[in-house]
Image: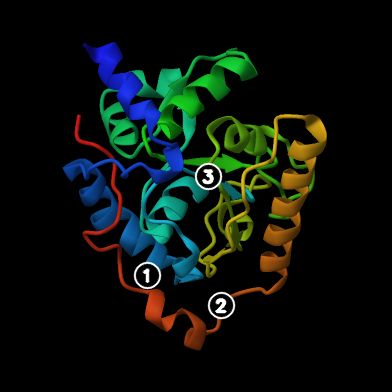
Amino acid sequence: MQRILRRRRRAEPPALLSTPKPSLTYRLISYLLVFPVYRLLFRGRTAGNANVPMDGALVVVANHGSHLDPPLLGHALGRPVAFMAKAELFRIPLLGPIIRACGAYPVARGASDREAIRTATDRLEEGWAIGVFIDGTRQANGRVNEPQPGAALLAARAGVPLLPVAIVNSHRALGPGGERLRLVPVHIRVGTPIPPPASRRRPDLDAATRACQEQINALLDQGLIQRSLSAPQLAPATDRSALPPSS
């Protein structure tokens, strides 16, 4: 019976699926922890929220400058963004349930790229937004320097759009070069969706990857968001936002 239901869910294109239902744990973390950290501590602002599809599967592609990026990104976009996390983290008593409720999914240490992509594709087929840091690791300058084609491949496999997002200044707040927290403004600029690659061939994947890189770096070049641009977008996510499913 479960296999039959799974086939029925997959009959509908992932980009048209309804997003997962809210979980209480996610709401508590988002509003009681991430909200004050992002909005107050780092004076967070977001521009371009109107570009975020609130329903259907999506590959969110971002630059990566800090360990702060995953929770800030999911909160700022108004819908949860699932990221890969080491399987060992899920066995930690308190941390495991929290990151699972926030949409993280486990990947075994030493797992092949194929296994990781299969796991992410399964999430897309459930209607999730999957987050991919396009460089694969934190960058000292916070920019997209050597983008990898993994995000484009996920989009091509599932037939879902890519959404470029620029996280401005997180590399200065808590970057890979040091462990001391700096209370600088961290802002997020959302770009415009990019259609999935026409095929899984390398030229098509490279073209989509390059388009993401160019858009993210162009958003970063705009710098911090002016108050007049961000004022209408400071409210936390409303009930229409897609949140992780209750377990």
At mark 3, the secondary structure is loop
Q: Toward the viewer: 246 or 50?
A: 50
| Rendering coords of residue 26 (x, y %) | 26, 45
Marks 1 and 3, how far apart at CA: 18 Å
The disc at residue 111 is none
Residue bearing mark 1:
40
Residue 145 against residue 233 in the figure, above or below: above
Percent coordinates x, y for residue 102 in the rendering: 33, 40
Q: How many numbered marks are there? A: 3
Amino acid at dot 2: Ile
Mark whose residue sits in front, 2 or 1: 2
The numbered mark, 2 or 1, whose residue comes first in the sequence reads: 1
- For disc 3, the marked residue is 67
Nearest to N terminus: mark 1 or mark 3: 1
- Asked if 107 appears above or below 221 in the picture, the reply is above
Label 1: few (<14), some or many (≥20) within 10 Å?
Answer: few
* Residue 86 visible in rendering: no
Q: Residues within 10 Å of mark 2 (few under 14, many from 20)?
A: some
Q: Find residue 74 and report its horizontal and vertical position in percent.
A: 41, 51
Which amino acid does the dot numbered 3 rest on? Answer: His
Front one among 50 and 148? 50
Q: Residue at x 30, y 66 (%)?
A: 236
Q: Residues within 10 Å of mark 3 (few under 14, many from 20)?
A: some
Q: Is residue 12 left or right of residue 181?
A: left
Mark 1: secondary structure: helix
120 or 208: nearer the eye? 208
C-alpha gap between disc 2 and disc 1: 15 Å
* Placement of 141 over or under 57, stated as above or below: below
Location of mark 2 (residue): 225
Kindly indicate the quadrant of the structure image that contains residue 209.
Answer: top right
